[in-house]
Structure formats: C-alpha cells, structure tokens
Image (cartoon, rainbow, N blue to C red):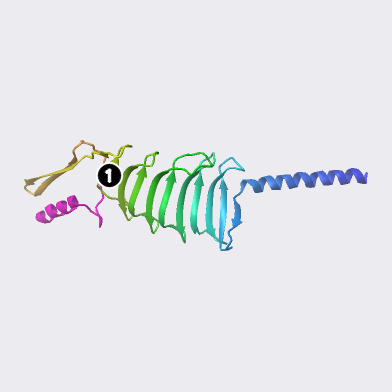
Amino acid sequence: MKTILLLLVSGIVFLFGCKQSSNKSVADKSTKSASDSITIVQRPFRGSNELIEYEIPVITGTSIKQGIQKRFYRHGSLYSSIPYVHGKREGIAYTYYSAAPDIEPPVWKEQSYKNNELDGVCKRYHKNGTLQAEYEFKNGNQGVHMKEYTQSGKPVKQPTLTISAKRIATGYYIQVYLSNKDEKVDYFIGNHCCPVNRILFNFLSITS
C-alpha cells in the first residue's frame, strides 16, 4: 500500500513540474550581459516557445531600454536594429530585407532618431544596395524635397508645387497644388519650413 501511495505522489509531483516548466517557456527569457548592468530580454513570437522575435536590452532591474534592440524575421534573419539611450530611440536605426539566417541582410531603411523622434536625413535602399530615396525629418515631421532614384541610380522626377494668389475684398485668395494634381498631401508648418511657407506667411502679413 505504501509503495502505491509513493508512486501516486511521485506522479503528481512529476506532472506539476512539467506544467510549471511549460508555463515558464512561454514567458520572456532574460540573460545578463558581461557588465551585468544590462539584461537582454528575449521575447518569442506569439504562439511559439522557441522562435525569438525580439532581443531587448534593458538596464538590469528595470524595463528601461539601453542599447541595440533587435527584431527578427520568423525564419531567423535580422529585421531591424534600433539604438536606445535610457529608454529613448537615439541614433541610426536600420530595417533590413529578408535574407538567409547565415547571411548579412541588405539594408532597406536607415532612419535617424534624436530624443525618440525621427530627426535628420533618412534613406531607403533598393535590394541591390543602390539608394532608393533620401528624405529629411525634423522633430518627427517630414520635410519637403524628397529625392527618389530608380534601381539603376537615375533620379525619379517629383511633382512641383504651384502657388497662385488673387486679390479679393478681404485680402488674398491663395491656391497651392501639385503639378500631378495629387490631393492626398501631408503639409507641415514649423521651424523646418520650406520657402513656400515663407511666401504664404508674406501673403498673410499683407492682409493683417
């Protein structure tokens, strides 16, 4: 009788231990770096216990990101690398084309961050490595005059901005439009304005 009870207890302990191990495998895994001040948190893909989607460096004992955060495609190649300084994106972030896990992936996007916002010259590349586009951000807002290039390196012609002004009783009636008649345009006015913004301000100052 004692032998049967011991076997039952052992079976229950074994099953409980398996359940505990299974639960742990779904959670994030953490490993400390050589300095012990940074912990690398490994976050798996949803529904997977083995495939790692993110490697997130955090200051040990906190959730503050510090260092290069890496994200991976499901098959294992690097998808993106983003630099963090005390919880904020700071520096050049890279996004990559899909590649074999043992091959260095070609860069797709190169984005400049300052104080957690896009700021500076950003670039996109064709898969063959030639420049596809070059554009600028300031404090998170995209500037004008984006340059685009074909895979062979030839510049893509961009639509021009046209402004017309007519005198009316209350001031000026101003029309601004693109040469390709595209109506879906985002327009920003701020410190990083283009000459067109200054023209508009001149018209407005006349009517005031």
* Nearer to me, 103 or 205: 103
Q: Is residue 147 left or right of residue 42?
A: left
Image spot of residue 88 (x, y percent)? 44, 58
* Residues rendered magenta in the picture: 187-208
The reply, left or right, for residue 118 in relation to residue 60 is left
**Amino acid type at mark 1:** Lys
Say which residue appears at 57% left-offset and 58% top-offset: 39
Q: Which residue is mark 1?
A: 147
Q: Quadrant of residue 31?
A: bottom right
Above-or-below relation of 37 to 92: below
Q: Quadrant of the C terminus?
A: bottom left
**Nearest to the observer: residue 71 or residue 7:** 71
The correct choice, above or below, for 206 with respect to 73 in the image is below
Above or below, 141 relative to 133:
below
Residue 192 screen position, x and y as percent: 25, 55
Q: Is residue 52 left or right of residue 189?
A: right
Disc count in the image? 1
* 90 magenta-colored: no
User: Which quadrant is the N terminus positioned in?
Assistant: top right
Position in image of residue 62 (x %, y %): 55, 61
Pointer 1: residues within 10 angstroms few (<14), some, or many (20+)? some
Residue at 37% x, 42% y: name it. 125
Query: Above or below — where is 54 with respect to 85?
Result: above
Helix, strand or loop at label 1? It is: strand
| Quarter of the image where one finds residue 32 | bottom right
Q: Is residue 195 magenta?
A: yes
Q: Name the one closer to the observer, 205 or 71.
A: 71
Q: Of all residues shown, which one is farthest toward the right? A: 1
